[in-house]
Image (cartoon, helix red, strand yellow):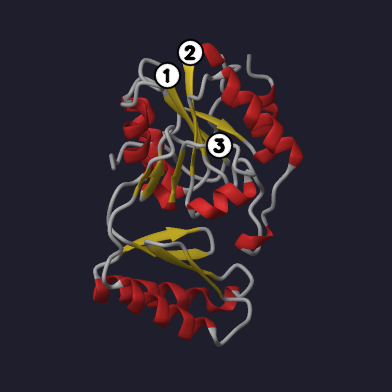
Amino acid sequence: MSTKALTIGLPTPAPLRLSQAALFLDLDGTLAPIAARPQDVRPDPRRTRLLEGLNAGLDGRLAVVTGRSLPDVDRILEEKIVCVAAVHGLVRRDGDGGVHQPPVHPGLPRAVAALKDFAARDSGLIVEEKGPSVALHFRLARQHAGAARELAHHLAAETGLALQDGDMVEELRTPGPTKGDSIRSFMQSPAFAGAQPIFVGDDITDEHGFEEAERLGGYGVLVTAHRKSHARFGLPDVEAVMAWLEAAR
């Protein structure tokens, strides 16, 4: 990733014009508020209706790009969105329903066992298995944050898994495509080709996506105001994202 980053305090994006755009949306922190437990994010009628309308207005040039697993995305979005990049880009489902996923890293079972053993000390520690990756959430057990991060770094060095830092979560993933790589792959498909890529996200893992959207002639929209970013524009929270998307024409 480039070291160049814009400062915080980003301008609000102009109204979205569907005829020109290819839209890429993160899920947690962008389309849904961050929840204490991953399973606490559930389907929402307003969000589902909005995504269905956007997908129709964009002629299918809509993809959800998220750290969630593919089954979890389908659960939350009620199977309304076909194009999905899940597990931070490791798993990609194209518009024809075809799924692309690298082989699971051989070190993953070791990491899963170690994280489950660690999580046994506190019910607020949650291990989330996502196919080619595993995440340890400690939002409900913040007193263990230091030890959780130390363990994750140790396991990454021991196993060769890629370490992904997040907001009150550490994830160990099979090395492979990022969110930016997935956006590039979608943009190379006939359905997306020629449109302007716009990626909306909140997490540090979304920076790869912001950079790729910019490189391809589009831009990123950061959903927060608390850090530097490669995004060109910003929105303060999930409600602002929903309002911006609902105003698209």
On screen, residue 133 above or below 82: below
Q: Nearer the viewer, residue 132 or 80?
A: 80
In this rendering, does residue 195 appear at all? yes
Q: Which mark is residue 20?
A: 2
On screen, residue 155 above or below 217: below
How many angstroms separate mark 1 from mark 3 (CA)?
19 Å
> Which amino acid, by three-letter code, is at mark 2?
Gln
The quarter of the rendered structure image containing the C terminus is top right
Q: Nearer the viewer, residue 18 or 201?
A: 18
Quarter assignment of residue 53: top right
Q: Residue at x 39, y 59 (%)?
A: 164
Q: Nearer the viewer, mark 2 or mark 3?
A: 3
How many angstroms separate mark 2 from mark 3 (CA)?
19 Å
> Which amino acid, by three-letter code, is at mark 3?
Ile
In this rendering, does residue 28 appear at all? no
Q: Which mark is residue 196?
A: 1
Question: Which residue position holds label 3?
Answer: 81
Residue 167: % across, % down? 52, 58
Task: First in sequence, mark 1 or 3: give its number.
Answer: 3
Element type where label 3 sits in the image: loop
Q: How many marks?
A: 3
Whether the residues at callouts 1 and 3 have beta carbons within 8 Å, the answer is: no
Q: Residue at x 54, y 78 (%)?
A: 144
Residue 241: % across, % down? 64, 33
